[in-house]
């Protein structure tokens, strides 16, 4: 399967909101409500931020939210903070196998 | 708490094999599938495959078929990923990640495998 498409980079100032898109096809993102999002700081393992499209695990700030429209899923971070600067990856399922997006580097200006 | 602890960094020569371990704790080992995901330097995440710790069944990414083998030891709650015929493109950080109904949490700390002559 091809990787899901994410913008290479996004940026925003502290306090602002940003949205990261994740575009797939009707065979993956569009077929299932199984998109998850992961945050990865340099040198660290990925951390789950959103699962099943819009659900937040315990302990994840409510500044993080997820949504989906058609074949595109989105991660929105509101009230940007310096510690949000990281790489973000989306993941969906295509049949029985997961497929990741190429990743988006978020810069907090 | 739920934790996945991986083995340490490895340096291998081209053509060799590497075996990375991932020891689980804090939950019933056989109740959750385990995945392996790798990340080449400066690159994104690549799914490698899945193992069912209960029965040992596996499924691998087509790209790695024939070179990757995932096994488990229920007595020690450990899963293993072995990659053979290593080449420079296999240089990456390798992660294990527990699946919870199509999402991954937690992840191991990662194991750097360097392939160099």
Image (tube, helix red, strand yellow):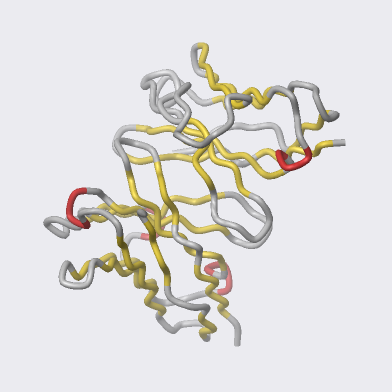
Q: In this rendering, would B58 be left or right of B3?
A: left
**Vertical placement of residue A96 versus A64, above or below:** below
Seen as rendered, the residue at the extreme top is A69
Q: In this rendering, would A79 be left or right of A64?
A: right
Q: Nearer the viewer, residue B115 or B27?
A: B27
Quarter of the C terminus of chain B within the rendering: bottom right
Q: Residue at x 50, y 37 (%)?
A: A59
So how many labels did they put on this image?
Answer: 0
**Res B67 visible:** no
Q: Residue at x 27, y 68 (%)?
A: B78
Quarter of the N terminus of chain B within the rendering: bottom left
**Vertical placement of residue B112 versus B11, above or below:** above
Q: Nearer the viewer, residue B92 or A17?
A: A17
Q: In this rendering, would B22 be left or right of A69?
A: left
The x, y position of residue A5, in whole percent, is 60, 32
Q: Residue at x 48, y 64 (%)?
A: B94
Q: In this rendering, would A97 be left or right of A78?
A: left
Q: Residue at x 45, y 28 (%)?
A: A35
The x, y position of residue A71, in whole percent, is 50, 18
**Vertical placement of residue B99 versus A34, above or below:** below
The x, y position of residue B51, in whole percent, is 25, 56
The x, y position of residue B75, in whole percent, is 16, 72
Q: Quadrant of residue B70?
A: bottom left
**Res B41 visible:** yes
Q: Quadrant of residue A74?
A: top right
């Amino acid at each position: 399967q091809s990787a899901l498409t994410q913008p290479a980079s996004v940026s925003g100032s502290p306090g602002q909101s940003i949205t990261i898109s994740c575009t797939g096809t009707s065979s993956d993102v569009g077929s299932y409500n199984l998109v998850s999002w992961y945050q990865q700081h340099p040198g660290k393992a990925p951390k789950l931020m959103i699962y099943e499209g819009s659900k937040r695990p315990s302990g994840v700030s409510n500044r993080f939210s997820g949504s989906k429209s058609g074949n595109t899923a989105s991660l929105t971070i509101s009230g940007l903070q310096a510690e949000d600067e990281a790489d973000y990856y989306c993941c969906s399922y295509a049949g029985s196998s997961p497929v990741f997006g190429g990743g988006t580097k978020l810069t907090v200006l | 708490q739920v934790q996945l602890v991986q083995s340490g960094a490895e340096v291998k020569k081209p053509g060799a094999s590497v075996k990375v371990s991932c020891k689980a704790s804090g939950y019933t080992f056989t109740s959750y599938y385990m995945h392996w995901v790798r990340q080449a330097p400066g690159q994104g995440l690549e799914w490698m495959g899945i193992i069912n710790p209960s029965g040992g069944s596996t499924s691998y990414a087509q790209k790695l078929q024939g070179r990757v083998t995932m096994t488990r030891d229920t007595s020690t709650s450990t899963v293993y990923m072995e990659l053979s015929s290593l080449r420079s493109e296999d240089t990456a950080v390798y992660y294990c990640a527990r699946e919870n109904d199509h999402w991954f949490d937690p992840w191991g700390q990662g194991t750097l495998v360097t392939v160099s002559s």
